[in-house]
């Protein structure tokens, strides 16, 4: 039996397309909206013949109405450093104007609303691990600010609609997520390392490689998001893997999984690059009964076939 109709903005992106899969599997009809600035139709090709799925190519910063929905999942935004560096103004617009458009749609139809926010709200944190109560250490005018501040504003707008208009809102702070359908040239750690390893190139380490990240496999991330969307919690919730790795350790895992003989090459650390990143997921465990199930090496192995095919396709173009 159908559980209603859900809107997913940014539905042709890496996370958005996986969320569409999960919602359909959960019994929802799904309309995915994406302007394809960074999303790809190939991520949704397997859903093309599903009668419960609809794709609309549109810019969510423009007024739109996809009809009555019970759920609005607002994931639209460039999310990788390469993408938001190139599309900084668009990133700010979708975090502000696009967020208002999505919130208004939820308000109009009395829909539950979930904002995909980010651990980047914590900036280069002075608290470790990061709890949701930490307000962050963010440079509001640095090169990463177009993404960081867009998401911080989107959180403020979401909370305002909860307080002033009683929209049933939810905010997920997503930590580094990886898996199939990532763009291999999007500048994030795992696709960078996988592509370089498979091509026999040196793996690029920024700084001395001692900075840390916590990598969450996509199926775990999506499960947390779906559970949060069904909950009664309105304030932000961290969804990420609390197991912390240095960038050097991640590179070693990639080399082990791929069998590559690639060497390491060191480059200067980008401006405002966080030195450490690890979620405190106590709140998600307590409220949602959620914690990740897939460790980094297992997730890399699950992603291997996808990255091999993507690298092979890229090398032929």
Image (cartoon, rainbow, N blue to C red):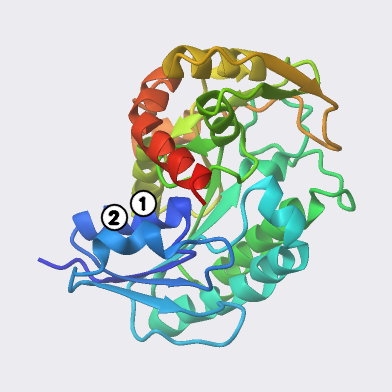
Q: Which mark is drawn over residue 18?
A: 1
- Residue plotted at (73% across, 65% down): 92
Q: Name the residue under label 2.
A: 21
Q: Is mark 1 on a helix, strand or loop?
A: helix
- Residue plotted at (61% across, 46% down): 186
Query: Is 264 on the left-hand or right-hand side of 269?
Result: left
Image position, residue 250 (x, y; %): 57, 18
Relative depth, front residue between 15 and 241: 15
- Residue 128 visible in the snapshot: no
- Answer above or below: position of 262 versus 201: above
Q: Is mark 2 on a helix, strand or loop?
A: helix
- Residue plotted at (44% across, 46% down): 313
Circles 2, 1 touching at the beta carbon (< 8 Å): yes
Question: In what quadrant of the picture does the N terminus appear?
Answer: bottom left
Relative depth, front residue between 5 and 106: 5
- Residue 224 visible in the snapshot: yes
Q: Which residue lies furthest to the right in this view?
A: 141
Image position, residue 218 (x, y; %): 41, 39
Disc 2/disc 1 C-alpha distance (Å)? 5 Å
Q: Mark 1, residues whose alpha carbon is within 10 Å: few (<14), some, or many (≥20)? A: many
Query: Is 167 on the left-hand or right-hand side of 51?
Result: right
Image position, residue 287 (x, y; %): 40, 39
Query: Is 140 on the left-hand or right-hand side of 26?
Result: right
């Amino acid at each position: 039996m159908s559980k209603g109709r859900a809107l997913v903005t940014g539905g042709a992106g890496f996370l958005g397309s996986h969320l569409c899969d999960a919602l359909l599997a959960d019994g929802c009809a799904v309309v995915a909206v994406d302007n394809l600035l960074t999303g790809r139709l190939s991520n949704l090709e397997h859903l093309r013949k599903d009668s419960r799925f609809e794709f609309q190519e549109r810019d969510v910063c423009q007024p739109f109405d996809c009809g009555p929905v019970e759920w609005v999942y607002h994931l639209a935004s460039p999310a990788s450093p390469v993408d938001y560096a190139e599309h900084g103004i668009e990133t700010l617009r979708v975090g502000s104007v696009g967020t208002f458009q999505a919130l208004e749609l939820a308000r109009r139809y009395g829909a539950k609303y979930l904002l995909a926010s980010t651990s980047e709200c914590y900036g280069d944190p002075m608290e470790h691990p990061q709890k949701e109560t930490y307000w962050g250490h963010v440079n509001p005018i640095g090169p990463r600010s177009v993404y960081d501040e867009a998401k911080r504003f989107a959180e403020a707008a979401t909370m305002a609609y909860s307080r002033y208009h009683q929209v049933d809102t939810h905010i997920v702070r997503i930590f580094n997520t990886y898996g199939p359908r990532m763009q291999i040239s999007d500048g994030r750690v795992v696709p960078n390392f996988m592509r370089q390893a498979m091509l026999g190139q040196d793996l690029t380490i920024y700084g001395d490689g001692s900075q840390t990240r916590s990598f969450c496999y996509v199926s775990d991330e999506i499960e947390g998001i779906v559970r949060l969307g069904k909950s009664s919690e309105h304030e932000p919730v961290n969804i990420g893997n609390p197991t912390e790795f240095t960038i050097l350790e991640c590179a070693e895992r990639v080399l082990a999984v791929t069998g590559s003989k690639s060497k390491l090459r060191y480059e200067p650390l980008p401006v405002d690059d966080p030195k450490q990143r690890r979620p405190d997921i106590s709140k998600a465990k307590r409220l949602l009964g959620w914690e990740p199930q897939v460790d980094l090496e297992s997730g890399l192995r699950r992603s291997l076939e996808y990255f091999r095919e993507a690298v092979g396709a890229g090398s032929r173009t």
